[in-house]
Amino acid sequence: MTSALLTDRYELTMIDAAMRSGLHDRECVFEVFARRLPEGRRYGIVAGTGRLLDLIRDFRFDDGDLDWLRDHAVVTPTTLDWLADYRFTGSISGYREGEVYFPNSPILVVDGTFAEAVILETLALSVLNYDSAIASAAARMVSAADGRPIAEMGSRRTGERSAVAAARAAFVAGFGATSNLEAGRQWGVPTMGTAAHAFTLLHDSEEEAFRSQVEALGSGTTLLVDTFDVPKAVETAVRVAGTGLGAVRIDSGDLPAQVAAVRRQLDSLGAVNTKITVTNDLDEYTIAALRAAPVDSYGVGTSVVTGSGHPAASMVYKLVSRRDAAGEWVAVAKKSAAKASVGGRKHPVRTIEDGVAVAETIYVGEPPAPNADERPLLVPLMVDGEPVADYLGAHGTGVARTHRAAAIAELPDQAFRLARGEPAIPTVYVTN
């Protein structure tokens, strides 16, 4: 199975109609942007770019795809012949993966003919909408954790392929590890995990379960202590593993009180270096509420893989410029109420003062002259149909993670408030 039919039918019927009118080869510029951030959010994080470049490079219609399209009369034979030879040969620029974005930031710019570019709409939005939503939520959790490690463990709360994408996006946003092995294999995300309550219940006693786990994984393992009685489990855990026990995990209860009590008990037993990790339906708000508690690390599931209530980033893919019949570039834009867009090729920069971002300045038309106070945001991502290697695979994922840290460091302090508010910096248009 190829990825070619993971798309909406109207992408192909538009190409079919454009081929009939002879406009399918007209040069065009498409742009991906979000009109708004989720309510109350101060910024977003671009994620999924590396995945998308792989998918575009391999976007092909095989014989099975073409047979299905033919059997269901989706497009005409002429268009089927065109699809059989489809390869994206255009160029793509965009915000680097891990970059901060704001309303109307042109995070992806696709240059190509109408037909070869429009067909990528559904694929681009499927990837960028989900991955950026996850990364944006994850980044807020990382900020709330205030330097304490966070692991992603939400595979069972989303689709099997979305789980891999979510783990990767959370890692780009600053999470330190994932429970998902495929994310580790494919994208180089560090993996973690020890045991669930089922492992304890398998044994005839909690002590037997702990001894079995320590024998298999060593005393540095993490023991789950809330299956029955937490104080009794903590005492048993230290007795079995010794004061060198790596960590205990708490997955239920009144976490602030529970964590404080467990810390006191561990210290009284001499396990002063044993860490405490919590994993009970956490989100950025509960993580922030635990700042004063002696928590050493967090594990987040449902909230991160669902974008903490916003599982899509509201991104759209719009035609913003095209050649006219005379070969001249013409800016085009949608004028619908509440859905208007800004036409023309964009040249976005991050305006920086004393190391702090103060505006997202988008030049429309001609690019601006170089300015030491403006950081250009568009970089080449795909040239003549070939992706830039530095953004691909496990290496590209690590590059994105590093860039996210640098981009976040430019934001003003108000960007990290969890209370409702406007975007951290304004978006300013300048027409050249």
Image: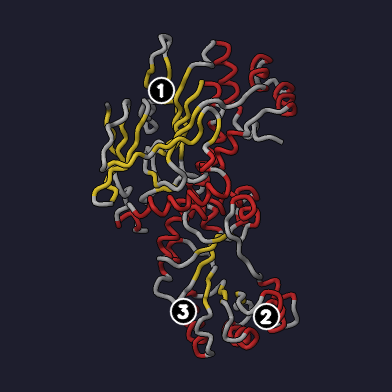
Residue drawn 45% across the image and 66% down it: 286
Could you tell me which secondary element the residue under label 1 belongs to? Answer: strand
Whether 413 is drawn above or below 396: the answer is below
**Which quadrant would the C terminus be assigned to in this image?**
top left
Residue drawn 48% across the image and 55% down it: 308
Q: Residues within 10 Å of mark 1 (few under 14, many from 20)?
A: many
Q: Nearer the viewer, mark 2 or mark 3?
A: 2
User: Residue tagged by mark 3?
Assistant: 257
Give left or right: position of 170 versus 404: right
Mark 2 or 3 closer to N-term?
A: 2
**Which quadrant would the N terminus be assigned to in this image?**
top right
Could you tell me which secondary element the residue under label 3 belongs to? Answer: helix
Q: Amino acid type of disc 3?
A: Ala
Q: Residues within 10 Å of mark 3 (few under 14, many from 20)?
A: few
User: Residue tagged by mark 2?
Assistant: 210
Mark 1 or 3 closer to N-term?
A: 3
Q: Amino acid type of disc 2?
A: Phe
In percent of width and height, residue 357 lies at: 29, 48
Could you tell me which secondary element the residue under label 2 belongs to? Answer: helix
Tag count: 3
Q: CA distance from mark 2 to mark 3?
A: 24 Å
User: Residue tagged by mark 1?
Assistant: 321
